Amino acid sequence: MMEIIERLKVKGITLTPQRIAIVEFLGKSVAHPTVEDIHKAIKRKYPTMSMATVYSTLRLLKELGEIQELSIMKRGKACFDPNPKLHHHFLCRKCGKILDMDVDCPIIKKGWVSGCRVEEAQAYLYGVCSECLKKEQSAKE
C-alpha cells in the first residue's frame, strides 16, 4: 500500500492520518469491505472520524483508479476492492464471501475489445464457495 500512498503524494493529494488509515486498511483487507466495515475498523483508532470522511476518501481513490467499487452487493451494500486491475468476483450465496477470480476472458485481451479500450469490466459469478461446499459435504457424512 506504500505504492498507493506514494502515488497520492505525487498527485498532490493531502494525506491526512485518516486517509492513510483507510488506504492501509484496504491494503490489508481481502474481504472486499463495505463503507461501514471500513468506518467501524478505523473508528477504533480515530473515534472522531465520520462516515463522510470514509465516503470521500473512497470516492477519491476510485476516481484516481486506485480501487474498485463493486456493483455486487454485500449485505445489500456496495463494497470496495483495493485491486484495481481487471479481474472478476465470486459471491458465495451461503456465507456472503466475495472472492477475487482470475478467469481468462478471451474477449478482453490486454484491456481492449474490438479496437475499444476497456477501462472497467465487472463480471460476477454466484454460487457456493469451496469452504461452504466442504461444510455441506461434512454435514451429509
Image (cartoon, helix red, strand yellow):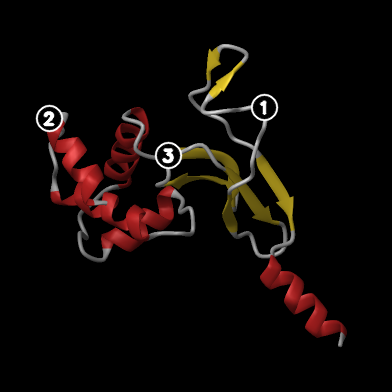
Alpha carbon distance from label 1 to label 2: 37 Å
Residue topped by disc 1: 107
Whichever of callouts 2 and 3 sits on the residue coming sooner in the sequence is: 2
Check whether the beta carbons of the residues at disc 2 and disc 3 lie within 8 A of each other. no
Alpha carbon distance from label 3 to label 1: 19 Å
Foreground: 65 or 41?
Answer: 65
Q: How busy is the neighbourhood of tag 2: few (under 14 within 10 Å), some, or many (20 plus)?
A: few
Question: Taking 95 as reference, is 20 left or right?
Answer: left
- Compared to residue 78, the image places residue 116 above or below, namely above
Q: How busy is the neighbourhood of tag 3: few (under 14 within 10 Å), some, or many (20 plus)?
A: some
Alpha carbon distance from label 2 to label 3: 20 Å
> SS class of the residue under badge 1?
loop
Q: Looking at the figure, which quarter contains the C terminus?
A: bottom right
Foreground: 49 or 120?
Answer: 120
Residue topped by disc 3: 84
Foreground: 34 or 85?
Answer: 85
Identity, as a three-letter code, of the amino acid under mark 1: Ile
Residue topped by disc 2: 12
Q: Quadrant of residue 7?
A: top left
> SS class of the residue under badge 3?
loop
The residue at 34%/37% (across/down) is 66
> SS class of the residue under badge 2?
loop
Whichever of callouts 3 and 1 sits on the residue coming sooner in the sequence is: 3
- Compared to residue 61, the image places residue 107 above or below, namely above
Identity, as a three-letter code, of the amino acid under mark 3: Pro
The residue at 62%/13% (across/down) is 114
Question: x%, y% of residue 57?
Answer: 28, 39
Question: Taking 74 as reference, is 46 left or right?
Answer: left
